[in-house]
Structure formats: C-alpha cells, structure tokens
Amino acid sequence: MRAPRSSAVVTSAAIALAVPLAASCGGDPAKDDSPGAGRSSAAPAPASPQASWIPGFVADMSVPEKVGQLFVPTFSSQADAQSMIKRYKVGGFIYFPGNMRTPEQTAAQSNALQKASKIPLVLGVDEEQGIVSRTPFITSFPGNMALGATGRPADARAAAQVTGAELRAVGINQNYAPVADVNVDPANPVIGVRSFGSDPALVSRLLDAAIQGYQAAGVAATAKHFPGHGDTSTDSHTGLPVIKHSRAEWERLDAPPFKAAIASDVDAIMSAHIVVPKLDGSGDPSTLSRKVLTGLLRDSLGFRGVIVTDSLQMQGARTKYGDASVPVRAVNAGADQLLMPPSLPRAYDAVLTAVRTGKISERRLDEAVSRILRLKERRGLFRGTRADPGRASQIVGSRASKATVRQVAEHAVTLVRNEGGLLPLKRGSVYVSGPRSDVLAAALRREGVRTVGSATDADAAVLTTLDAGAATTADRVGALASLPVIVAALGRPYDLDKADRAKAALATYSSGSPSLAALAKTLAGTIKPTGKLPVPAAGNPPGTGLTY
C-alpha cells in the first residue's frame, strides 16, 4: 500500500492552531511507507487541491480494507477498539462519555488507537453543546438556540472554534455538529433548542460561522440532519417520523442551511432517519433513499463531501428493514460513513458480501472510500494525529475558553416583556423558585440583589421554568400572582407562550451556570439584555427583544 504524498502548504493560521497540539514525532516516515507511520500532531493544514495520491491509494487497498473504512462504531474499551481495528480495519470510532474520563486519558487513548491503525482514524463525537454534550470535561456552551438569540455569527464561530480546539487537543478530529435543522414545530421532541432557530436565513448565517469555527480548529464539521428534521412530532430515536413538507416548502424552509453548509465547504453532512414523501414517495427513510442522498444532496445541491448516516442503532433506521439490509441500502443510497451499526460484525459482513456479489458496485465503494480519505487529508490526519496528553488539560477549560462562554451567555439573554419597568431590579427583596433557583438566587446575591426564602416576605418573584410546557408555566405564574412575577425560560422559550400574567419574561435557552450568571446580571441591571427571539414565543415573532 503506497503512502500519500502531502503537497499542502501549511498556512500561518494552521501553524498558530498547531501550537497547542504540538508533540514529538512518532517515528521517521521515510523508514515506513504505511499511511499510519510517523504521524505526529502536525498542524491541520488545508488539503492539497487535488489530493492526487488518493486514487492510487484506494486502488492498492483490498476490498475488506475498503469496507472497513466505511464504519464508525462505538467501543466499550480501548482493547475492544483495538480488536475492531485489527479485525475490521474500521475507518474510525465515535466517543461517548464512558470512553472519556479526563483530557489526559482521552488524548492517550486517541494516540493508542491511531497507532494501532494503518490508516488514520476518524475519531468523532456528538458534541453539539447545550443539551447534547458527550464530552464530560469540555468547556460547556449554552447551545445553538442561545447562539441564535445572539444573532452574532462571530459568537457562533468563536464557540465552535473553542469546542473544536478542545476536541482536537484530546485527539478527536470529527464533530457530528452543527445542527442545520430549522425548528418550525414548537412541539418538536428531538430538535428544539438544538436548532439555531425558526428562520432559515438566521440558521444559515450561524451554521456557516460554526462550520468555519470547527474546521479552523482542525475538526471536521458535520451539518445535520439532511433533508431537515425541524418539523416533526416524532423522535427518530424511537420511531420513524414523516415530514409532510411540499417540495416548495422544503426549498423555502429546510434547504437553505444545507445550501449554506455546502457553500461553506463543510466536510460532512449527516442524513436523517425521516420520511419526506414529497422528496421520495417510497416510504424509505432518507438515510436509505437514493432519491434524497444521491439525487437531491449530491446531484441537485452539488455536495461532494462525506455523507454520514445518523446512528444506525436508532429506531428510525430500523423500522422498515433488518440490520443486515440497512447498511447495504445506505451505501447504495449514497452514504459514505456508516455510524454506530447495532452489530459491527453483522453489518460489515453484509456490506462485504454485497460488494463481492455485485449488489454494491466496487465503483460505489471506491467513491465512498475516496471521500473518507479526502476528509482525513483535509483535516491533516495523514500529516499528524498525535495529541499531547500533557497539554490537553491546559487547553481544555482555559480562561480564554470560559471568557467566550460568558460572552455568548450574556449576549443570548432575551427580554420579551417588561411591564411598568419592573426590570432591572432596583430595590426590595426577591423570592426565587423553580428549576435551578438555588443557583440563580446565589448569582443574584452576587449582583447585590436581596433574596428571601418565602413569597410572603418578597416584593417580587422570579420563577424559572425548564421545558415545563406553556400550560404548566402559566399555572405556576398564577400561583405567584399576588406578587409581580418575572418568569425566565431556561430551556425552550415556548414555555412563555401562555405566561401572560407575568409582568416580565425572559429566555436564556440554557440552564447552565454561565447562562444563570448572565440572567442574574441582566435582572440586576449589571448588563443590558441584547438577545432577540430566534423562534416565535410569548406571543411575539422572531426578532423580538427588549432592552433597558
């Protein structure tokens, strides 16, 4: 197997990014021509324009090696992962919290896995931030809807670049983020605050910025979930959603962010386990639909990067076909990476058999493998994968990272009602109740606001709510109506839809400590609210936001 020749020029930006990743080389490439030899943590520079070595490299691979490159499974232990590398020559792994104890351990583990593989591995994680965060030690950001409320692409890029740099510091080189879905259904059980908002133009702008942030940090970005999961009342983890958008509605609502992602040269796009009858009337989920993945995403939108399936363990992928049929159908539909098969041995054998019997053509297999190798080349993996365990903990959770979190959280706080100028709180005592009320009360005291333990002793009440639903929130506001009530939605802002009796209403889109600190500063008047609703809420359209 021939070794790739990297002709990329390392830019000054890439050199700057390499500083926290630098480590001694693992060997002399001249003494070993295998693709995995001599890899260090060299800078993740842009790929050479043609990556001209890839066709010859693929031609030298055996069919079993090519099939292995398609798979990105989970693993229970480092030994388990190394066994899969040896047996199946897998293309990568996806990390979950059980695989990551500390930055140092994770970096060392990533190095060990890369060393065991002849071809550099994609080491991925589902690190959207907000309510979907898999990395236990990562600097925690409020999430996409909070970024949508800031309306600031610079914040979206900065958040993604911080997250990307911390992931790359521990050897993770692909993130299954950012979410491109436009959340137009307030009752959506699976997307919600994972989306930047309900306006396709806003989602497109922030998605573009996030992609640039991840990829500037040397991490492959993955826009998801194509063709758009924002208008469903079914969770594809537990069922097979059907989205009834017409082709015209899809073009207007769902397509713009994916078009923006493609224009941003995103590394990968993830498919959704959803049925959109107006895009494909077969009833197949989009992950298994050639009309959607090849006809629409490849041919119509012109995407040339890697198509990765959403987890094949999800019920949406398994409702119609068996676990041996699904990966074969996904590859023939146009998918390149097969994420989290329920059984790697069964899925691998099914795809290998399909290639050997002609059910999957070798041309189709070579196309998929070539795209995966181009992604790895673009992210610098053939030029270096080694993470520095000694420096990982210095990069993760740095002072600069935390400062970026504070900035995003403060920019996101959205004031949508302020009757009689109740806010900011200038005098008197406040009773705080609801989810995370202890944290908020402590933060208010730090800002000089006096809190009391009983509503009967208070001059005003602050009620927090966290995805309680509009009706429940309204009831809780009513129970405190003897006082001026300030209601703050810490999760989905739709909680505010029936909170008409509250004198003031705000949204933070996150219940994390940075968001609560930002809320306390806003309530106290230490900072002015600048956020704008990214979705309709509290009877107001997107774009609504008051200030002092």
Image (tube, helix red, strand yellow):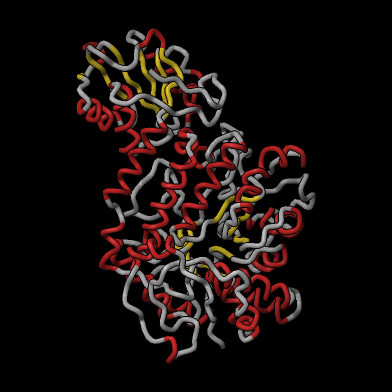
Q: Quadrant of the C terminus?
A: top left
**Snapshot quadrant of residue 300:** bottom right
Residue 204 falls left or right of residue 417 = right
x, y percent for residue 391: 27, 64
Residue at image position (72%, 66%) is 332
x, y percent for residue 445: 20, 25
Residue at image position (40%, 40%) is 142
Residue at image position (40%, 16%) is 504
Residue 334 falls left or right of residue 385 = right
Residue 166 falls left or right of residue 186 = left
Q: Furthest-bottom residue in view?
A: 31
**Snapshot quadrant of residue 457:** top left
x, y percent for residue 293: 70, 57
**Snapshot quadrant of residue 347:** bottom right
Image height of 385 relative to 138, above or below: below
- Whether residue 300 is visible here, answered yes or no, is yes
Q: Which of these two is toward me, 286 or 124?
A: 124
Residue at image position (43%, 92%) is 31
Image height of 455 relative to 341, above or below: above
Q: Quadrant of the N terminus?
A: bottom right
- Whether residue 272 is visible here, answered yes or no, is no
x, y percent for residue 336: 63, 66
Q: Which of these two is toward me, 491 or 118?
A: 118
Q: Which of these two is toward me, 24 or 183?
A: 24
Image height of 528 relative to 248, above or below: above
Residue 58 falls left or right of residue 133 = right
Image height of 330 relative to 384, above or below: above
